[in-house]
Image (spheres, coloured by chain):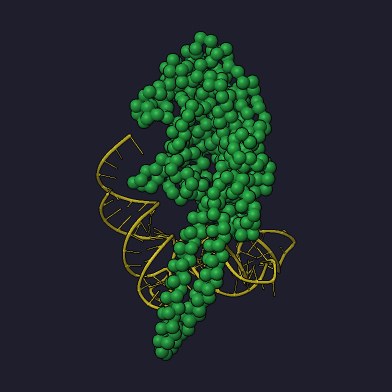
Chain colours: A green, B yellow
Amino acid sequence: MLDLKYIRGNPDVVRKAIADKREAADLDGLLSFDEELRALIVKADELKQERNVESERIAELTKKGEDASEPISRMRQVSARIKEYDERMASLRAKLHALELTIPNIPHESVPVGTDEEDNVLVREWGEPRSLCASPVPHWEVGENLGILNLPAAAKIAGSGFICFVGLGALLERALIRFMIDVHTKEHGYTEVSPPFVANRDAMTGTGQLPKLESDMYHCGEDDLFLVPTAEVPVTNIHRDEIMEPGRVPVRYVAYTPCFRREAGSYGKDTRGLMRVHQFDKVEMLKFVEPETSYDELETLVANAEAILQRLELPYRVKTLCTGDLSFAAAKCYDIDVWAAGVGAWLEVSSCSNFEDFQARRSGIRYRPAEGEKARFVHTLNGSGVALPRTVIAILENYQTANGGITIPDALRPYMDGVAEIS
RNA sequence: GGAGAGGUGACUGAGUGGUCGAAGGUGCUCGAUUGGAAAUCGAGUGUACGUGUUGAGCGUACCGAGGGUUCGAAUCCCUCCCUCUCCGCCA
């Protein structure tokens, strides 16, 4: 959510952001509601002041035993008018707020303007895109062959787009989670959290999943709870409606959660195997920082995610998303794609974003720079560190050996009970 | 799921219809005192919105949330949420 005063003062900047992000938002409607509302506030406040003053007089008269019926009947009418104003303002506020939630964040000046992923800009590449064997097969084949992946079982249980790991496959998943969290807590200074995997409507709205993406969320109607689409939702909301005391920021968290996404409307060949699933594991990093440092923090965030892939010796590339590919709430975002030799494709395993104060304003997350100073909104950032299934794909495909087995990356072996190869 | 208790400012804790944005205490900030500190004394100490010759002032709102009663609600009524205690159930 943007500052309404900012929108009022810089409508052209906001209009450009909406266009660059290819969003549809009724800015003019918002501005006119805002103007109408402020006019009503002035009138209603005047009436309320009159009522407050007169109420005090009525109290005095009553105390002295004098007749107060004249001001009372007059105030009865004033109150009726106030009620009318309050009702009009309430409905106007609701409409205004609904529109406010549809205004996207403004891209940072360093973000390239573009229409879709074709216009994203390559920042750097790491490692050689290759495999241990000459002609690696796709992960679903090698996984089924080795008995570590049972997709038909997952389909039987929950339908297509779900995963069932077996044996060393399941251990590999668990090892990756532990490996990533350990690196981030022990070497990168993050604090581990294990949050709820469901979130309520307020939490989902605070981070920006609602109202726009409701149809992509799994929803428990009975309790009006949503399965988390990313740890970003529960972890960002840890500090919702808080003012963090001086010295508290920067706060850095890392969390493992499963992520649930309906992926409604996603069809095509990139949905094969583990590439696009409804439930996947992810280790996510989040930061709450001072505004002045947020772009430096974004760079280290990306570096922290890259460190995971470097340890696993998986080739990857980093891209800056252009305005058209940038998500609704982000001001700037880097995507990291890992190379998967079997399917011969770059797969997105991390998205590292700076939301500036967009989520913080929406969620009421502030900090006090020093004792006695005015509270300011923090800047929030988050990035995957990293998403599991596509990392598993890369391991199954890039570490495939000529005999159809899988070599375990050195960094993972301590977490795999020393297992060096799956065969 | 059943029964009960409770939600007030950074914290603690008063307040059952008007003089309450809210006593007292603690903490914090500034000042006095001191060689320095403690103690003591004095002053100050929320957020949001609006208005404004723009950060002085003024106004409005906020005592878990939302409604209602009333000229007037922290105080009375209703609904919901959350916390705690006991019982039941259970990993």
Question: Is residue A201 in sight in this rendering?
Answer: yes
Most distant residue in the top direction: A403
Q: Is residue A85 above or below residue B79?
A: below
Residue at image location 48% in from the left, 26% down from the top: A269
Q: Is residue B27 above or below residue A118?
A: below
**Residue A47: horizontal and vertical position, in percent?**
50, 76
Question: Is residue A190 in sight in this rendering?
Answer: no
**Residue A266: horizontal and vertical position, in percent?**
47, 34
Residue at image location 64% in from the left, 20% down from the top: A128
Kindly indicate the quadrant of the structure image that contains residue A26: bottom right
Most distant residue in the bottom direction: A66
Residue at image location 61% in from the left, 24% down from the top: A315
Total number of numbered labels? 0
Q: Is residue A241 above or below residue A77?
A: above
Q: Is residue B4 left or right of residue A19?
A: left
**Residue A135: horizontal and vertical position, in percent?**
55, 13
Residue at image location 48% in from the left, 15% down from the top: A422
Q: Is residue A217 left or right of residue A321?
A: left
**Residue B74: horizontal and vertical position, in percent?**
42, 68
